[in-house]
Image (tube, rainbow, N blue to C red):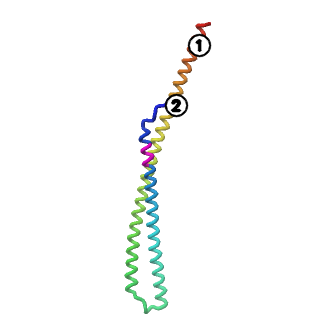
Amino acid sequence: MTKSFRLQPILDLAEREAEKSALRLGTLTAQASQLELKLQLLQRYREEYLERFRTALRDNPSNLPFGNFHEFMDKLDTAILQQQATVEQARKQVAAGQREHLDRRRRVKAFGTLAERHQTTAQLQERRAEQRALDELTSQRGSRKARSA
């Protein structure tokens, strides 16, 4: 019977933490993707609005409210800048989540290696004990045969 791995509870904990970090990383990545999509939408909307304004300017330049255009463009630019900052923060969180997840996986791998070494050592000791017992049994049988002959 092999001895149990004394660090098994720590290995189990490390595995659970690695699973949790993987889930957190997935959530962070999904959130970052959503924020990037929103940024792209704002940028696309800005380009479309600018193109509509240019078209209207070509078609009827005297009838355009320039003040409204500039005010709206300023608001769009502000929203885009804020969204870019939010996206950058989300990217940093994803990078931190990736580092954390890699660290957790390394920890699991290290404890897994220790568990494998423990099991290998225990199996080797068990085989040696079995071999000693077999050698002793063979020796006893040989002694009995020699005495009875």
Residue displayed at 51% across by 28% down:
126
Residue 9 % position (x, y)? 42, 40
The residue type indicated by label 2 comes to Gln
Rendered view: 91 above or below 82: above
Q: Which labelled disc corresponds to residue 123?
A: 2
Q: Which labelled disc corresponds to residue 52?
A: none
Cα–Cα span, label 2 and label 1? 28 Å
Q: Residue furthest bottom?
A: 62
Q: Quadrant of residue 76?
A: bottom left
Per the rendered image, the range of residues in magenta is: 12-17
Residue displayed at 45% across by 67% down:
36
Q: Quadrant of the C terminus?
A: top right
Rendered view: 67 above or below 117: below
The residue type indicated by label 1 comes to Gly
Residue displayed at 48% across by 83% down:
52
Q: How many marks?
A: 2
Main SS of the magenta part reads helix
Q: Which residue is mark 1?
A: 142
- Earlier residue among tags 2 and 1: 2
